[in-house]
Image (spheres, helix red, strand yellow):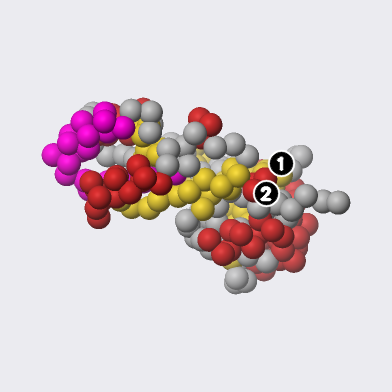
């Protein structure tokens, strides 16, 4: 399997710059030992069970190190903050690795560490004009959703919601994990902050990679 190298745009869980995604059937069984049934009651084949046990032995030595892991469906994700450890993981788990996220260089790594959850690196600003993304708290009252939706009309072109967020604001989607909107500039961001107050979950600022990377001579 060819390993895909991907760019880290933001620290994972606010801490980890590296992410290794492994492809392994019934990934949760790697840590809970239950690998005998999969999906809608389908029994895991002996070949699949053997592969799970092989992966368990390979990954076991890393689970007590300074990492975070998350298993879901057929993906076992490992997050770390150490490049040497990343290389060890990459070598040991190579047969199962689907992709690896990481900063492109030391400048990006330090920038991400210094800015935590506040900044998101990108190659292009969303839609060529939005500098920020604002995530809303999901417990926003219906009355506030309605008034915010109407208030945004005054800022046409400066605020843009995703389609799913628009449905959430219209109460078409009662439960939506991450409603958000894009915001063009700092002045508009300030107005949103005043309007929504403590109903804002987190704000990200998009930063072009080219603005922090030093050209090589």
Res. 24 in view: no
Q: Quadrant of the N terminus?
A: top right
Decide if residue 101 is on the left or right side of residue 183: right
Count the marks: how many?
2
Give x and y (percent) for residue 124. 59, 36
Residue at horizontal 76 percent and vertical 39 percent from the top: 2
- Between disc 1 and disc 2, whose residue precedes? 1
Residue at horizontal 38 percent and vertical 33 percent from the top: 158
Crowdedness near tag 1: few (<14), some (14–19) or many (≥20) residues, C-alpha within 10 Å: few
Residue in the foreground of this view, choosing between 138 and 117: 117
Give x and y (percent) for residue 58. 70, 60
Residue in the foreground of this view, choosing between 13 and 97: 13
Res. 132 in view: yes
Say if the magenta span includes residue 135: yes
Where is mark 1, residue-wise? 4
Decide if residue 194 is on the left or right side of residue 5: left
Region of the chain picked out in magenta, as a range: 132-155
Residue at horizontal 61 percent and vertical 59 percent from the top: 111
Pointer 1 with pointer 2, Cβ within 8 A? yes
What numbered label is drawn on residue 97? none
Crowdedness near tag 2: few (<14), some (14–19) or many (≥20) residues, C-alpha within 10 Å: many
- For residue 120, above or below residue 64: above
Can you tell which quarter of the image residue 125 is in? top right
Residue in the foreground of this view, choosing between 105 and 23: 105
SS under mark 2: strand
Give x and y (percent) for residue 62. 65, 66
Can you tell which quarter of the image residue 181 is in? top left
SS under mark 1: strand
Residue at horizontal 33 percent and vertical 52 percent from the top: 201
Give x and y (percent) for residue 214. 74, 53
Determine the CA span between mark 1 and mark 2: 6 Å
Where is mark 2, residue-wise? 100
């Amino acid at each position: 399997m060819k390993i895909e190298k991907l760019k880290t745009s933001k620290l994972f869980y606010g801490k980890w710059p590296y992410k290794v995604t492994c492809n392994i059937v019934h990934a949760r069984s790697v840590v809970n030992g239950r690998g005998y049934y999969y999906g809608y009651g389908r029994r895991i084949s002996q070949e699949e069970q053997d592969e799970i046990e092989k992966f368990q032995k390979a990954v076991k030595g890393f689970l007590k190190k300074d990492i975070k892991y998350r298993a879901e469906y057929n993906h076992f994700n490992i997050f770390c903050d150490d490049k040497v450890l990343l290389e060890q993981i990459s070598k040991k788990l190579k047969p199962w690795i689907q992709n690896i996220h990481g900063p492109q260089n030391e400048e990006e790594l330090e920038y991400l560490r210094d800015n935590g959850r506040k900044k998101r690196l990108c190659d292009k600003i969303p839609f060529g004009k939005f500098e920020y993304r604002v995530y809303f708290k999901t417990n926003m009252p219906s009355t506030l959703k309605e008034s915010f939706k109407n208030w945004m009309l005054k800022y046409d072109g400066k605020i843009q919601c995703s389609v799913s967020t628009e449905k959430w604001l219209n109460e078409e989607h009662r439960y939506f994990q991450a409603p958000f909107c894009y915001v063009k500039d700092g002045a508009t961001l300030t107005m949103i902050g005043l309007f929504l107050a403590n109903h804002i979950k987190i704000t990200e600022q998009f930063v072009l990679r080219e603005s922090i990377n030093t050209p090589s001579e």
